[in-house]
Image (cartoon, rainbow, N blue to C red):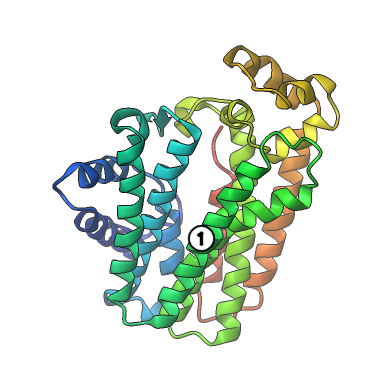
Amino acid sequence: MTILAAPHLAYVERVEGRLSSAVGRSGAVSDAGGRTLQSGGKRLRPLLVYLSAPCDRREGDELVAAGCAVELVHMATLVHDDQLDAAPLRRGRPTVWSTDGAAVATATGDHLFARAFAELTGTGSLQAVTVLAESCLALARGEVLQRQQARLVDMPVEQYLERCRLKTGRLFSAATMLGGTLGGLEEAQVDALRRFGESLGLAFQIADDVLDCDGDPDTTGKPLGTDLLDGTMSLPLLLAARRDSQVREVLTRSAAPEDVLPTLARVATSGALEECRAEARRHVTAAEHALGQLDGRVESELLRAALRSAIDRER
């Protein structure tokens, strides 16, 4: 990620060390959490915490604790999502569910959630804890919505966006709000960061949905067609189902592995992917508008670079 200068790298390294300590080193749950940590990730959410704080308020441990907490929540959601989706791989590595079973996967996700709040309480900020708690409640609501919306091919796009706002946007906005809150910004500035983070999260999720249809598994770390196989109504599938009766037919039943490549080819030729990319750009524009309302204490250009890196990912 090109936005990583020396101070940013030092911060990410501090977060990485704190994550390792927070996950623990003994017991089945800690071991499983450690493997989840070792599978890597871009650490975009902790970086957003750091970049959302004024430059003169980035020293000390508060932002490190907040960045660690946000990433632990993200890790917990991945473990639980893999269990719910019966996913064998995550970033090219076996998932906790596939190697240790459902009971350990559930406990590992719960452990990571608990550790997140243990880290954040060290900041002494009740407002910070409230921000993260509300985002976790939104995550749970979004997960339930995703299950309820499975194979609903006539679902309005607005319902898809609301799910993405809950499942993805709210944790991104929690990261930016934590940076602004712990960095001492005024309420109006924190709210601008909230809107930036939420729009960034929506653009990120739409880009992720496109990669599930048109990405390189060696780069994304997961096989193509995951959403198709588990019935998740991503935006590309939703739009393609309106234009192609064969895509619609596959989505309304349980897709088989042999359905994946032919169906994704039809999704691509339907024009749905181009429309999704246009929708992602719309949320990028909204995120940039929110950045324009900051007062100059935050490095807006670096946040714009983070925005670009989140959606301009390799196939």
Is residue 302 visible in the rendered image? The answer is: no
Q: Is residue 209 above or below residue 17?
A: above
Residue 311 at what x, y percent from top left? 59, 47
Asked which secondary structure carries label 1, the reply is helix
Residue type, label 1:
Leu
Most foreground residue, 23 or 19: 23
Q: Is residue 44 above or below residue 183?
A: above
Q: Residue furthest front?
A: 103
The residue under the point 56% across, 85% down is 187
Residue 160 at what x, y percent from top left? 71, 48
29 on left or right of 308: left
Quarter-of-image position of residue 264: top right
Quarter-of-image position of residue 31: top left
Q: Residue furthest top?
A: 258
Residue 23 at what x, y percent from top left? 24, 53
User: What is the quadrant of the C terminus in the image?
Assistant: top right
Query: How many numbered marks, from 0 up?
Result: 1
Most foreground residue, 141 or 234: 141
Most foreground residue, 262 or 268: 262
The residue under the point 63% across, 28% down is 228
The residue under the point 70% across, 33% down is 151
Most foreground residue, 297 or 272: 272
The residue under the point 31% across, 78% down is 123
Q: Which residue is mark 1?
A: 171
72 on left or right of 2: left
Is residue 11 visible in the rendered image? The answer is: yes
Q: Is residue 262 above or below residue 60?
A: above
Residue 78 at what x, y percent from top left? 43, 44
Q: Residues within 10 Å of mark 1 (few under 14, many from 20)?
A: many
311 on left or right of 68: right
